[in-house]
Image (spheres, rainbow, N blue to C red):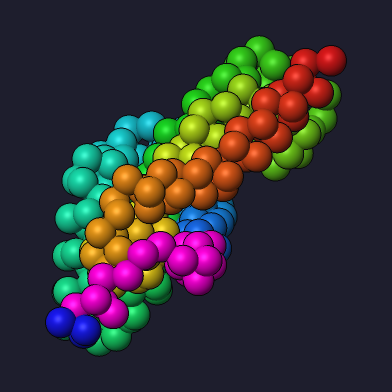
């Protein structure tokens, strides 16, 4: 009886600290995955734009698979099949790999849209002025394209941050997994989920506000 009472205990300040540490883990895996995925997504988007036909049949098809298959299925399959090919990855590393690929698949279309947002006449004008292909990309396409698709990229980043909760199925103790552990022990689901929601809000809101202010600055 005493063991039961000691196991089912109320919510304490230590539990709040436990959730805070889990929120930092959520932030870390999200930042790492979004950064890696964005870099590869931009490269994939450029390849899709330059190779409209073959890119759509090869790379585009692969990216469609990662966009279409539910993320939780990708995580479970990769984590269980990776050891078969000699990749002994822990839940964190497996989560980063799949979240990065998933982010890249989403960002690829965003990046391609950014390149397409720069009209062909403007690009021909830059080449007429003597710019090389890479100078055109750097000084013309990049500044205009980033401003055109920045809101879409922010939406992808915030979505991936929330989707990182699915890594909990692999055993990685991020915010959702920590909440489940505390709910099992305290039997106070409403309180703990409300606190977890506040942590997610605290992680997401500064990003959305900074993005909004950056867009306002660009419009001036």
Q: Is residue 187 left or right of residue 196?
A: left
Q: On the image, which quarter does residue 55 sit in? A: top left
Quadrant of the snapshot with the N terminus: bottom left
Would you place residue 109 above or below residue 72 in this image? above
Q: From the viewer's perspective, is 37 left or right of 57?
A: right
| In front of the other: 41 or 139 | 41
Q: Relative to residue 24, is residue 63 depicted above or below?
A: above
Question: Does residue 47 sit above or below 139 in this rendering?
Answer: below
Residue 70 visible in image: yes
Quadrant showing the C terminus:
top right
Indicate the position of residue 157 as horizontal and vertical percent values: 50, 42
Taking the magenta stretch, the answer to whether it contains residue 153 is no
- Magenta range: 4-20
- Based on the displayed image, in which of its 4 quarters is residue 11 positioned? bottom left
Residue lying farthest to the front in this orientation: 1
Q: Residue at x 41, y 44 (%)?
A: 194
* Residue 173 x %, y %: 37, 69
- Where does the image place residue 2, in percent across and percent down from the top left? 21, 84
- Residue 184 location, x and y as percent? 24, 65
Query: Of residues 25 and 4, which is closer to you in this image?
Result: 4
Q: Is residue 10 magenta?
A: yes
Q: Residue at position x 68%, y 26% from top?
A: 212
Number of disc labels: 0
Can the viewer see residue 157 in this picture? no
Residue drawn at point x = 35 percent, y = 59 percent: 179
Q: Main secondary structure of the magenta part?
A: helix
The residue positioned 33% from the left and 81% from the top of the image is 89
């Amino acid at each position: 009886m005493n063991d039961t009472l000691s196991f089912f205990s109320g919510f304490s300040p230590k539990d709040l600290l436990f959730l805070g540490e889990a929120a930092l883990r959520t932030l870390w895996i999200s930042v790492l995955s979004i950064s890696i995925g964005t870099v590869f997504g931009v490269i994939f988007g450029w390849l899709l734009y330059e190779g409209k036909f073959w890119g759509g049949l090869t790379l585009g098809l692969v990216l469609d698979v990662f966009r279409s298959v539910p993320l939780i299925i990708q995580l479970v399959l990769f984590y269980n099949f990776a050891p078969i090919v000699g990749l002994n990855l822990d839940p964190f590393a497996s989560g980063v790999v799949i979240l990065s690929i998933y982010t890249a698949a989403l960002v690829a279309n965003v990046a391609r849209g950014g390149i397409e947002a720069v009209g062909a006449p403007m690009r021909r004008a830059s080449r007429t002025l003597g710019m090389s292909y890479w100078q055109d990309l750097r000084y013309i396409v990049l500044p205009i394209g980033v401003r055109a698709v920045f809101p879409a990229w922010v939406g992808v980043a915030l979505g991936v941050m929330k989707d990182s909760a699915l890594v909990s199925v692999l055993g990685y103790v991020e915010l959702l997994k920590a909440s489940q552990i505390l709910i099992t022990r305290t039997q106070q689901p409403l309180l703990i989920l409300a606190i977890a929601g506040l942590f997610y809000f605290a992680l997401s809101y500064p990003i959305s506000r900074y993005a909004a202010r950056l867009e306002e600055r660009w419009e001036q």
